[in-house]
Image (tube, rainbow, N blue to C red):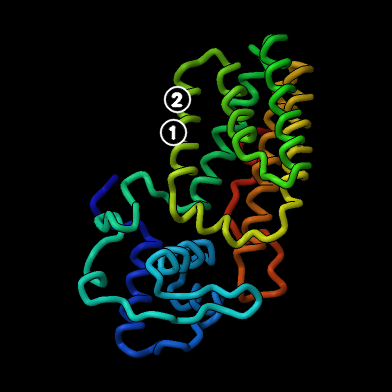
């Protein structure tokens, strides 16, 4: 990764500088996400990732439906450092923004699903079906089915019989699992019913794979990750009640595949 800060980190640093300068005293509320985005002339996605970064440092408290409040002043030393160099936060060069990871997964995993549809075997399908059954049982028992979710995506990549594709998928999921920013974002999700929707998405993907339908598998995986993105985007927005879920800059499916 280049030594220069990622853009959301630069924005986070500028927000910390504003806090240090007294623009936002402790207990005060930050401007709405939309206004901060306009101020920095960037997307709300980047602002959201910068806010998650500040939350990880314990500087702000994100209250759903209320706003973002300053709860601690940044130290002078930390204000001069790149988060990537701050090991106490558990961040490293693999710590990409959560929405950046989603976009990469959407593009890459949809292609992996299409490739898997041409190579998948009866044994692969049986194993995937068993994993989805385990996922369903975990959800009905009040869990998240997270391990089964990961296993299902892994099995799809393995079904391509392409070791490079499998390695790429494993890399993306390691980033997802180990990213403090991703974990923090998931903590804001209160409604666990989203897992039931994602299970239905998985079943749609499996049906396309069983039919050996590359286009259908690609579309089903694309839509699955789009659904994930929309839920996370909606639930991570704390300022605008009219947020419609389309502010993350997804590359339209037709642009890439039709």
Against 167, residue 222 (above or below) is below
**Secondary structure of the residue carrying numbered label 2:** helix
- Residue occupying image coordinates x 45% and y 20%: 164
Judging depth in this view, the residue of 183 and 43 nearest the camera is 183
Q: Is residue 254 visible?
A: no
Against 61, residue 247 (above or below) is above
Q: What percent of the width, then of the height, locates residue 93?
A: 31, 46
Total of numbered circles in the picture? 2
Against 122, residue 239 (above or below) is below
Q: Circles 1 and 2: CB distance less than 8 Å?
A: yes
- Residue occupying image coordinates x 55% and y 46%: 102
- Residue occupying image coordinates x 38% and y 80%: 72
If the image is split into quadrants, where does the C terminus sit?
A: top right
Residue 171: numbered disc: 1
**Secondary structure of the residue carrying numbered label 1:** helix
Judging depth in this view, the residue of 43 and 152 nearest the camera is 152
Q: Is 162 on the left-hand or right-hand side of 213? A: left
Residue 167: numbered disc: 2
Q: What percent of the width, then of the height, locates residue 206?
A: 74, 25
């Amino acid at each position: 990764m280049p030594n220069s800060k990622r853009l959301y980190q630069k924005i986070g640093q500028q927000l910390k500088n504003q806090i240090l300068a007294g623009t936002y005293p402790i207990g005060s509320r930050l401007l709405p996400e939309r206004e901060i985005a306009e101020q920095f002339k960037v997307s709300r996605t980047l602002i959201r990732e910068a806010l998650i970064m500040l939350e990880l440092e314990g500087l702000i408290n994100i209250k759903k439906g209320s706003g973002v409040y300053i709860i601690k002043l940044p130290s002078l030393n930390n204000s001069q450092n790149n988060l990537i160099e701050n090991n106490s936060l558990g961040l490293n060069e693999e710590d990409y923004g959560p929405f950046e990871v989603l976009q990469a997964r959407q593009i890459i995993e949809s292609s992996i699903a299409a490739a898997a549809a041409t190579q998948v075997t009866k044994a692969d399908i049986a194993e995937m079906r068993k994993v989805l059954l385990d996922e369903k049982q975990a959800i009905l028992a009040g869990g998240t089915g997270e391990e089964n979710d990961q296993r299902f995506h892994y099995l799809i990549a393995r079904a391509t019989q392409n070791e490079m594709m499998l390695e790429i998928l494993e890399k993306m999921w390691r980033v997802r699992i180990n990213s403090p920013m991703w974990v923090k974002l998931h903590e804001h999700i209160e409604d666990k019913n989203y897992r039931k929707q994602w299970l239905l998405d998985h079943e749609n993907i499996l049906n396309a794979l069983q039919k050996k339908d590359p286009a259908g598998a690609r579309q089903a995986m694309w839509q699955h990750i789009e659904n994930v993105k929309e839920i996370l985007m909606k639930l991570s927005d704390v300022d605008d009640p009219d947020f419609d879920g389309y502010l993350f800059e997804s590359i339209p499916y037709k642009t890439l595949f039709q």
